[in-house]
Amino acid sequence: MKSFNDYSGYEFVTAILPRQSARTVTQEVLGSGACNVMSASARGTLMQQYWYEAFLPAISPEQEMLHFIVPGQDVDRLMEQIVIVGKLQLYGAGSIFSSPCEQLVCADDYPLWTTGEYQFESVSFDIKFKRDLTALIHTTDRGAADPIARAAIKAGAQGATINYVRGFGLRDRLGLLRITKQHEKELITIVVDEFDLDAVFQAMSQVGRVDQPGRGFIYQLPVSKGLTNLASVFQAKKHSVSIHQLVRAVDTLSGGTHWRANPLLVHDPRANEFASNSRGVEKNLQLLRVVSQRKDSEMLLHLFLDQGISGASISNWRFTDSQVSLSPGGIRINREFGCVSLVSTPANVAKLVDVFREAVTSQELRLTCCFTHGVPMVKTFAPIY
């Protein structure tokens, strides 16, 4: 019979890197004793310099999202190694952030990263992670992400990262009309300063029209620490620094973001095209993520839908284990995993964790775990349940 272990003090670390540097970072981290790396393909979003270029397709550099479930005492060392190897101190080199896991439940055969395995020791390198960050996660229909990303950048965010997921919920309750609604969705991830949070959140929710039926939703995810250095504007002419670098430099010199509130620099709120709108906002919910082999992920998702939740999505991840054998060419052989993600009330999430335990036991599922995060705010049309 399956047994489960409950853990506390773990964090979920996400690194967003250009594809050419992601492989190097993965090899270095695994070589330092990391248990595993979960990765997903993604793309960035670059606005172009001139107004008329807004009518052209967005520039979308290839990216990789690397995910780690890490003991709290190893988080700083892992993040430092990724910053050093990936050169994240350079503009446009990527970003990294961690979010605390409120609850972590693992089946006894899940290869969890345990304390003492990771051997990387920090070198003399001055890295200052920011602690006033929040991640914004926006789920929308496929093909609708670029205007939302543009709005976020215009409102003060750095570059957005977009990857594909499959969404379930509303479509599956439409009967024959479900042919008008596709499973394919786009997931937009943006990490913003606390000062820019409200403006970017409102910009994304308004352009994404999340207060209308079937338009997806957006939520906030707390970040314990992070570093963002993603490019957001493509310029044909080279300049020594970007506007985001200038803002960051002034933040550092001023000791924070308070200088941005200078009345001389703030526009009249009545002229703000992204005016605040509280319709459809819900607070104090939870995000549940369930990691499993890809062949099991859809079955688990439908079990959750049977409990009456509003909806859920599946992301396809590649699971790279440090113990896996190498191909003749020296390449690690990845396993195909899936991550089921959903947002619901804390009471419902607690029930779903019990459903997860029962399903893993009764179906004899292998290599599974689930974990939760607090979600301060969600905006969508339908109530979350």
Image (cartoon, helix red, strand yellow):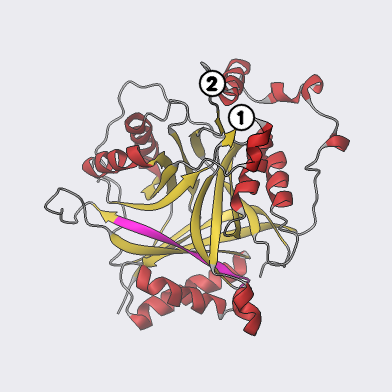
Mark 2, secondary structure of its residue: loop
> 190 or 12, which is in the foreground?
190
Mark 1, secondary structure of its residue: loop
User: Which amino acid type is marked by label 2?
Assistant: Lys
Query: Which residue: 61% across, 44% down?
Result: 149
Query: Label 2 to label 1, Cα distance in Å?
Result: 9 Å
Q: Which residue is mark 2?
A: 237
Decide whether the magenta segment is chiefly helix, strand or loop: strand
Q: Which residue is mark 1?
A: 49
Check residue 85 for magenta coloring: no
> 213 or 45, which is in the foreground?
45
Q: Quadrant of residue 119?
A: top left
State if disc 1 and disc 2 touch (CB < 8 Å): yes
Q: Is residue 107 above or below residue 156?
A: below
Magenta residues, as a range? 308-319
State the count of labels. Answer: 2
How far from the left and from the top, in percent, is residue 334?
Answer: 26, 58
